[in-house]
Image (cartoon, helix red, strand yellow):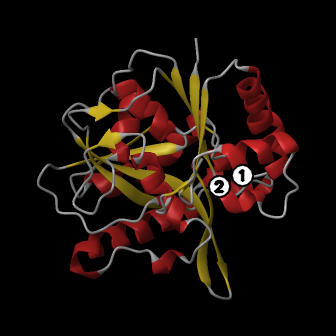
Amino acid sequence: MIVAATLLLPGSSLLQGVALPPVLARALARADLQVLGGDAQDQLARHFTCQPDAAGRWPVAALTRQLDAVDAGDGRWLRADPAHIAADMQGVRMLAHGPALAIAPDHGAQLAASLAPVFDAHGLQLSAPDPARWYLRLPAAMVLPPLVDIDQVLGDDLFDHLPQGEPGRLWRSLLSETQVLLHQHPLNARRSAQGQAAVNSLWFWGAGSLPDRIEHGYAQIRSPDPRLQAMAKVADSVAGGHQLVDLRHLRNAQTLLDQALLPLLVALEKGELEQLQLDFADGLHY
């Protein structure tokens, strides 16, 4: 039985300018409010304990590799995700990546296979167990430059986020080589003819190995995010009736109200739910 629920929500600015229904206004007025600050990574860190790298990033590639292929083991992994980029007056922007490209599984495998020799030459193994999530298995001793999470790059000029300096030279070169091959691939010509965005770039991010331990305080975790699905799979669940529900993907205020907040608040007022926590991505916690 679920007796408490914590909602992971997008930034509270989504509700700015929206007329709050009375049940929500009453609940927020009575709630304990904490202003925790931080960003999207800090939001997740409030609920999961996972060993980060030196820059404070989680080993997303190893976690999702275990979800997708159950073979992360003690390997060192890097995401090499398919993306769509386009030039404009300000530079070259990433406009879509991963699931948004709707790559068929066999097409993902074909595209990845065409790029594999580029990586083989540097002792890197490319594979695509999921069409939206591609992986490189890295040599244990390989030194990586700082690599930016893909969600931070989306919508931005690619060149603002490229790995810099001598440590980044190999990765800039690999990016350029694979962009040329993807541009020439007949599957992309077919996608363009069908009105689909071309898979014309990769993005390298999420490096690391599977952590020894992940902890959270929930009996059940519900999320469309493969990162959270992977962490829930690796971690041990706990006893009790506290559920974590990830709603960060809901970007329409009315949808968020109608499908999530209002039904749960009604349940709270009726005593069907003992506690409800609202954790917004910008750090407001009710």
Q: Image height check: is 103 above or below 95?
A: above
User: Which residue sits at x=18%, y=35%?
Assistant: 74
Q: Are marks 2 and 1 in contact (CB under 8 Å)?
A: yes
Image x and y of residue 158, in percent? 51, 74
- Image quadrant of residue 51? top left
**Which residue extends farthest top?**
1
Residue 113 in sight from this viewpoint: no
Q: Is residue 45 left or right of residue 269?
A: left
Q: Quadrant of residue 107?
A: top right
Residue reaching furthest front? 30
Question: Which one is nearer the viewer's eye here, 98 or 174?
Answer: 98
Q: In the rendered view, would you say 128 is above or below 179?
A: above
Q: Is residue 75 left or right of residue 85?
A: left
Q: Is residue 259 visible?
A: yes
Which residue is the extreme one toward the left?
141
Question: CA–CA distance between discs 2 and 1?
Answer: 5 Å
Q: Amino acid at mark 2?
A: Asn
Residue 75 location (% of width, % of height): 21, 39
**Few, some or many C-alpha atoms within 10 Å of disc 1 (few <14, some 14-19, many ≥20)?**
some
Amino acid beneath label 1: Arg
Q: Residue at x 26, y 37 (%)?
A: 210
Q: Foreground residue, 120 or 170?
A: 170
Residue at 32% across / 79% down in the picture? 164
Residue receiving disc 2:
188
**Marking on residue 191:** 1
Q: How many marks?
A: 2
Residue 191 locus on image (x, y percent): 71, 52
Helix, strand or loop at label 1? It is: helix
Residue 272 figure quarter: top right
- The quadrant of the image that shows the N terminus is top right
The relative height of residue 197 versus residue 24 in the rendered view (above or below) is below
Rendered image: mark on residue 84 = none
